Image (cartoon, coloured by chain):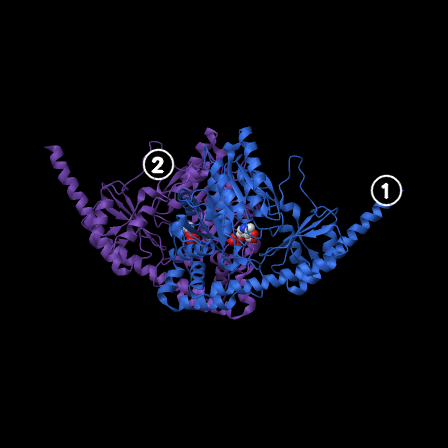
Chain colours: A purple, B blue
Amino acid sequence: MPPAPLLRSGKSNRTTDSPISYFIKKAIETPGLISFAAGLVDEGSLPVDDVRVAAAEILADPLTGRAALQYGSTQGLPELREQVLQLVCTADGVKPADVNLTAADVCITTGSQQLLYLLGEVLFDPGDIVITEAPSYFVFHSLLVSHGTKVLTVPMDAAGMRVDELEALLERLRRSGDLARVRGIYTVDYFQNPTGLTLAVERRKRLVELARRFSTDHRIIVLEDAAYRELRFTGGDLPSVKRFDTTNEFVVYTGTFSKPCAPGLKTGYAILPPDLMAPILHLKGSHDFGSANLSQHIAARLIASGAYARHAEELRAVYRHKRDVMLNALGAEFADFPAASWTVPDGGFYVWLTLDGIDTGPNGPLVPAALEAGVLYVPGEFGHVPDESGSSPSNECRLCFGVATTEQVTEGIRRLRKACAAVSASKGAKKVPAGV
Amino acid sequence: MPPAPLLRSGKSNRTTDSPISYFIKKAIETPGLISFAAGLVDEGSLPVDDVRVAAAEILADPLTGRAALQYGSTQGLPELREQVLQLVCTADGVKPADVNLTAADVCITTGSQQLLYLLGEVLFDPGDIVITEAPSYFVFHSLLVSHGTKVLTVPMDAAGMRVDELEALLERLRRSGDLARVRGIYTVDYFQNPTGLTLAVERRKRLVELARRFSTDHRIIVLEDAAYRELRFTGGDLPSVKRFDTTNEFVVYTGTFSKPCAPGLKTGYAILPPDLMAPILHLKGSHDFGSANLSQHIAARLIASGAYARHAEELRAVYRHKRDVMLNALGAEFADFPAASWTVPDGGFYVWLTLDGIDTGPNGPLVPAALEAGVLYVPGEFGHVPDESGSSPSNECRLCFGVATTEQVTEGIRRLRKACAAVSASKGAKKVPAGV
Ligand SMILES: Cc1ncc(COP(=O)(O)O)c(C=O)c1O
Ligand SMILES: Cc1ncc(COP(=O)(O)O)c(C=O)c1O
C-alpha cells in the first residue's frame, strides 16, 4: 500500500533544494575534478593548531571547561559579544558609544547564515519586497523565495551596488504605492559573493540616508552582510554601512568566524537595532535557544589570545596569492579570447567571469564541456533573480579560489579555457550546417 | 524624532518570549537562590576530560583537524549519522534493515530543538492541528504558537499519554471533519519534560497503529522526542515508538547529545521518513546549511572511543542519586502536607509536584513566597495549553534536579515546604476574616 500523502506547509512547498547542490554532488562524485564551485575555505590554512591550543586551555580547567560544555544563552556568550563589538568598532574607527552600541546589541548565531534566516523570518511576510544587488548571494535568494518574498534588484558596477539606481527604484515604488511593502535592502558589501566587488565608501553613507528617507511609514532595514570583510588583501578597510547608522536604527550588520577563522565552529554574529533584538531572540529561542557554546568559547579564546588576528592576517596573504594565481591564469589563458572579462577582487575568494556569447547556464553547453575537461564553476544565473520575462543573464561564472590549491587554480583555468574553446568550436560548427 | 515603526511578520508577531526567561533571569539576579527551574544538566559530571581528549586527538592530526574545521554537510557528518543509527537500533534491539533504515534517514541538527522547529516549519501551516500530551514541553508549545498551529491535548497517567483518549479525540475530529487539519502528534515518551513520566510499551505500539489508521487522506506524523532516553536509572530500556514504525513512514524520532553528554556541543539528531528528509534539508539549507562541524566530530569520536557510553552510564548513577535525594526530601518535608503528591521518574531529571489547593501559577502566591524563601520552580501552568475557557491547571510545579547539587536539592525542598506553609497560613488567615 503506498503511504498516505504527506501534506507540507506553504513555506516548505516554496523551499527548494539549493541550486548548487547538484554541482557539489558532481564534484564529490567525479575523481580528479577541480572545483571552483563550492564556497569552501582554503584547507591548508585552517587554524588547526590555534584551535587545538584554545580547546586544550578551555578544557584543562574544570571551571572554564564546564562553562563551555553547559548550555549557553540564546543571545550568546557575553564575552564574545563584547569582543565582536570591539572588533567591528575598531575596524570602523569608532568607539561603540559614538555609534550608540553596547554588547547588548550583539547576538551570536549558527554562522551568519542563521541570522540571515532569522531576520527574514522576523521581517518578511509573503508578498513583501526585498531589494538586493544583481547578482547576489544565491542562498539568500533561496531563503527569500522560501519566505514568499518578492525580490527586486539593483545593478552593480565596479563600485558595488548602484545606489543611484536604488534611489530611482525606491522612487518608482513610492509612486506606484508599493513602498509600503518594501521591508529590506540586502548588500554583501565587501568582496561580494558572487562578484568579488566592494561597495564604495560614499555609497555606504548614501545607503543609510536612503533607508532613512524612504522610511516614512515604516522602517526599511538595510541588511549588511560583511561575511568577507576580514579577508581584504589590497587597499585599506572601508567603514561599514553600519558605521553611518549612528542611531542604531536602520542597519543590521552580520559577520562570521567562518571565513577569517574556521567554518567548523559555525559561529557568526550580528549587530542589531534594539527593537529587532527581542523578536530575533524570541524566534531563536524556538529554533535552538542558543548556538553551540563550545564553539563560542573557542572563538572568544582565539580573539583574546591574539591568535584570531594573527591568523586572519596570514589568511590575507594566502588568498591574495591565490587570487593572483587565478588572475594570472585568466590573463594567460584568455588573452586570445576577447569575449572574456573578469573582476579583480580586493579580498574574499570570488572572481566573476563574463563570457560574452557563451551560455554558462545549468542547461547550456559550457557546464558539460567543463565537466568533460575536469573543472566546475557556478553558473552566474544562480545569483540572478529572473526578470518579468523569466530570463536572467546567462553568460557569467562564479569562480571560487577558496578551496582549490594554487596548482589546481592554474590547471582549472586551463581546463575552463579548453571547455570554452570546445563550446565555441561546436557553435561555429553548428552554424555552418545551419547556414548551408 | 522617534524611529519609523518596525513592521514585523505574522510569525514574529505570534512569537513571544519564553515563559521561563523571567524565571531564569530571577535566578541569575538573586544570590543564594536555589533553582529547580532551568533544565540545565549536572555541572560536576560534564565530560570535560573526555571532550578534552577527543578534541586533542582530532586536532593533533592535520587531516582530521582540517576536516573538523571546514564546513560540513547540511545533513551532518556521515560517520556520526551511522553511529546514531546503530545506537538507536541497538537500544531498540533491532537491526537497521529490520526497520527499513539506513544512515541516509538520519540527520544532525543544532540540538534536537532545531529538529523540532524544522519539522514544525515543514509540516504546519497556521490553523493546522497538533496533538500533544497535557502537560508537555513548553518550548515546543511556544514553537507551535509561533507556527500558528492549534494545539489539542491528551491527558496523561502514570503510564504516559492516554492513548485511548488520543483515539477518542481522533474519532471526534474525524466526525467533526477536522481530521483533515491534524498534522502531528507529539510525545516526550521517556521521563517526560515536565512530568518525568514514561509511555508504556503497549501504548507505543498502539500509537503507531493509530497514526496509520487515521492517516486516511494524508499522513499524520508522530514526533517522538526521546531527549532523555539515555538517562534511565531504574528498570530496563523500552523500545522506541519508532521501533514499531517498521516501514519508516509515520514516526520521526529525535534524540540529543545535550542530556547524556554535553549541551555545549549542541548536537542533536533525527531519524526521518525519506519523504520528510528532503524538505527538512532544504529548509536547513536556508537556516544554516549545516550545524557546527567540530561538535559533530567530537561527538563521533566520543562514541567511537567508548567514552560516550561510559559517561552516560556514570550519569545515570549521578541522576539516580539526585532523584533519590529529591524524593527523600519531598517525603520528609511534605509528609505532614497531604495536599502534596509527586511523580517518581525512572530517568531524566524532572519531578512533577502537585499541590492541591495552592495556586502555583506565575501570578499566584507561591512564586513570591518561594522566591522569598530562596527557591525557584517552573509553574506547571507553562506546560499546559489553556482550554476553551482560557484556564489551565495551576497547582503543579516542575522541579528539575539536573543542575542543583544534592545539598541544594535537600535545602531547596525545605525552602519550598516553608513557602507552602506561608501560603497556606495566609490563606487560612484570610479565610478567618471572610468567615467572620
Ligand atoms: C555572502 C555570504 N553570507 C553569509 C554566508 C554564511 O556563512 P556562515 O553561515 O558560515 O557564516 C556566506 C557563506 O558562504 C556568504 O557567502
Ligand atoms: C523534551 C525536550 N526536547 C528537546 C530539548 C532540546 O534540547 P537540545 O536542543 O539541547 O537537544 C529539550 C531541552 O531541554 C527537552 O527538554
Residue visible at 75% across and 54% down in the picture? B419
- Depth check: give the residue in front, A223 or B171: B171
Identify the subunit bearing mark 2: A
- Depth check: give the residue in front, B436 or A64: B436
Compute the Cα span from label 1 to label 2.
75 Å
Quadrant of the frame with the N terminus of chain B: top right
The mark found on residue B434 in the picture is 1
Query: Residue B11 appears at what percent x and percent y?
Result: 53, 39
Query: Residue B72 appears at what percent x and percent y?
Result: 39, 55
Do discs 1 and 2 share a chain?
no
Viewer-nearest of discs 1 and 2: 1
- Depth check: give the residue in front, A155 or B177: B177
CB within 8 Å, label 1 to label 2: no
The mark found on residue A386 in the picture is 2
What kind of residue is marked 1? Ala
- Mark 1, other Cα within 10 Å: few <14 / some 14–19 / many ≥20: few
**SS at mark 1?**
helix
Asked if residue B268 can be seen in this view, the reply is yes
**SS at mark 2?**
loop
- Mark 2, other Cα within 10 Å: few <14 / some 14–19 / many ≥20: some
Identify the subunit bearing mark 1: B
Q: Residue furthest left?
A: A436
